[in-house]
């Protein structure tokens, strides 16, 4: 065994990469870095090994090449015009060895800065692709979807023409019922790239439902029905991700208590009475503006609840004495809206198209960085 002797001697120039060490020590997101800190392909191979790929296994280089090709295609289709896509250097678009991108992303200097920035952009998107492909929850998505919607289908019923929310006692008519069965792969990737935490945070809206009622008071009654059916409880709601920009509960309580006896005495469904209560609520309610999502447009009003559900899947390598399925928590969204809020969400700044454009703009800036964006703009013909 060789003798170890304390030393600070280095084969090359003894220096510190301050920006990279700052990112590690102070928690700077990888997507906000402008360069890596690798010296050569040997460093790149060690980096890839610790990242999780054994390059001695034939599948690993193939998976890396596939992720590289998908990343380049995603960048070209999502962030660039066809003319701008031609600006990607050939050695970044089609490297002989994708590991060389890690070296390109580490080299600084006037002659290689553009190549470094393009390599960084591609690697950031590849990182997101690897996350999606190796997320165990996404691998069990069929079981997750079946169990989540199995619970929802017990309270959301249809007579063939309309949907209703029922807890077995009250029955609320829905104007619209939208099910989000799965977030598309590119949509997941886009959301990962624009989030401040990058891959540290899960995507919470892979699955979910949007329930649209005629009035805000019916949204309040829907919360009650979901609570009484135990789909919502203080133990399974992610309080940190609850967003209420629809219901001023203090004002709603006063109005509900005022009309409660008339609701109880109503013959049939009291649609007109609920609209009258909504009109009073609109006059008395305080504006609700709490929203932590920077891409949500003004005028978008809803109650959005993130629900934790324990999902059970079979474990193939379970111990003989284990007589139960493995469980893990999965979070999905329930969103409640009234008719007016829903209509506003279809156009203008509150619309989904406007929301998606803001997401793309944010992700584009974070993936490219402002220096590369300026270079792209300088080389883009203006009509």
Image (cartoon, rainbow, N blue to C red):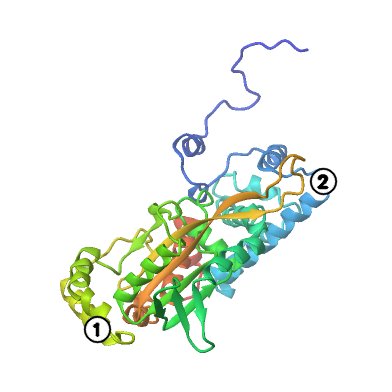
Residue 98 seen: yes
In the rendered image, residue 253, in percent from the top left (x then y), is placed at 22, 66
The quarter of the displayed image where residue 279 is located: bottom left
Mark 1 residue crowding within 10 angstroms, few (<14) / some (14–19) / many (20+): some
Residue 368 seen: no
**Residue drawn 57% across the image and 43% down it:** 36
Q: Nearer the viewer, residue 183 or 101?
A: 183
Q: Earlier in the sequence, mark 1 or mark 2?
A: 2
Q: Which residue is mark 2?
A: 57
Element assignment for label 2: loop
In the rendered image, residue 155, in percent from the top left (x then y), is placed at 49, 72
Q: Report whether 367 appears left or right of 232.
A: right
The quarter of the displayed image where residue 229 is located: bottom left
Q: Report whether 380 appears left or right of 288.
A: right
In the rendered image, residue 308, in percent from the top left (x then y), is placed at 50, 55
Q: Nearer the viewer, mark 1 or mark 2?
A: 1
**Residue drawn 37% across the image and 67% down it:** 223
Mark 2 residue crowding within 10 angstroms, few (<14) / some (14–19) / many (20+): few
Identity of the residue furthest to the bottom in this view: 161
Total numbered circles: 2
Q: Which residue is mark 1?
A: 273
Element assignment for label 1: helix
Q: Nearer the viewer, residue 297 or 123?
A: 297
Measure the C-alpha gap from mark 1 to mark 2: 69 Å
Q: Report whether 253 appears left or right of 353.
A: left
Q: Nearer the viewer, residue 247 or 371?
A: 247
Q: Report whether 137 appears left or right of 305.
A: right
In the rendered image, residue 154, in percent from the top left (x then y), is placed at 53, 71
Q: Which mark is residue 158?
A: none
**Residue drawn 62% across the image and 50% down it:** 327
**Residue drawn 33% across the image and 87% down it:** 268
The quarter of the displayed image where residue 173 is located: bottom left
């Amino acid at each position: 065994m060789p003798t170890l002797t304390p030393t600070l001697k280095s084969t090359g120039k003894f220096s510190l990469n301050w920006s990279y060490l700052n990112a590690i020590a102070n928690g700077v997101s990888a997507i906000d870095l402008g360069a890596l800190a690798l010296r050569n392909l040997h460093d790149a191979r060690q980096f890839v090994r610790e990242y999780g790929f054994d390059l001695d296994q034939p599948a690993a280089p193939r998976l890396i090449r596939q992720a590289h090709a998908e990343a380049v295609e995603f960048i070209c289709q999502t962030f660039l015009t066809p003319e701008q896509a031609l600006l990607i250097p050939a050695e970044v678009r089609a490297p002989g060895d994708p590991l060389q991108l890690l070296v390109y992303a580490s080299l600084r200097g006037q002659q290689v800065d553009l190549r470094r920035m393009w390599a960084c952009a591609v690697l950031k998107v590849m990182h997101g692709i690897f996350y999606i492909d190796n997320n165990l929850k996404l691998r069990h998505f069929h079981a997750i979807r079946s169990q989540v919607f199995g619970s929802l289908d017990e309270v959301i019923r249809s007579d063939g023409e309309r949907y209703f929310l029922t807890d077995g006692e009250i029955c609320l008519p829905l104007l619209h019922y939208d099910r989000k069965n799965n977030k598309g792969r590119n949509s997941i990737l886009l959301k990962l790239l624009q989030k401040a935490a990058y891959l540290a945070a899960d995507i919470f809206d892979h699955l979910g439902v949007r329930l649209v009622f005629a009035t805000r008071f019916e949204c309040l009654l829907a919360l009650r029905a979901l609570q009484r059916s135990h789909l919502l409880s203080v133990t399974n709601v992610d309080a940190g991700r609850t967003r209420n920009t629809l219901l001023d509960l203090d004002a709603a309580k006063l109005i509900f208590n005022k009309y409660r006896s008339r609701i109880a005495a109503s013959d049939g469904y009291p649609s007109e009475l609920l609209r009258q209560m909504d009109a009073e609520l609109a006059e008395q309610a305080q504006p609700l503006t709490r929203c932590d999502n920077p891409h949500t447009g003004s005028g978008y009003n809803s109650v959005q609840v993130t629900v934790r559900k324990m999902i059970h899947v079979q474990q193939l390598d379970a111990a003989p004495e284990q007589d139960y399925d493995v469980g893990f928590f999965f979070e999905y969204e329930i969103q409640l809206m009234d008719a007016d809020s829903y209509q506003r969400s279809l156009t203008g700044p509150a619309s989904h198209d406007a929301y998606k454009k803001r997401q793309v703009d944010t992700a584009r800036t974070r993936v490219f960085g402002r220096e590369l964006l300026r270079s792209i703009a300088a080389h883009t013909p203006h009509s």
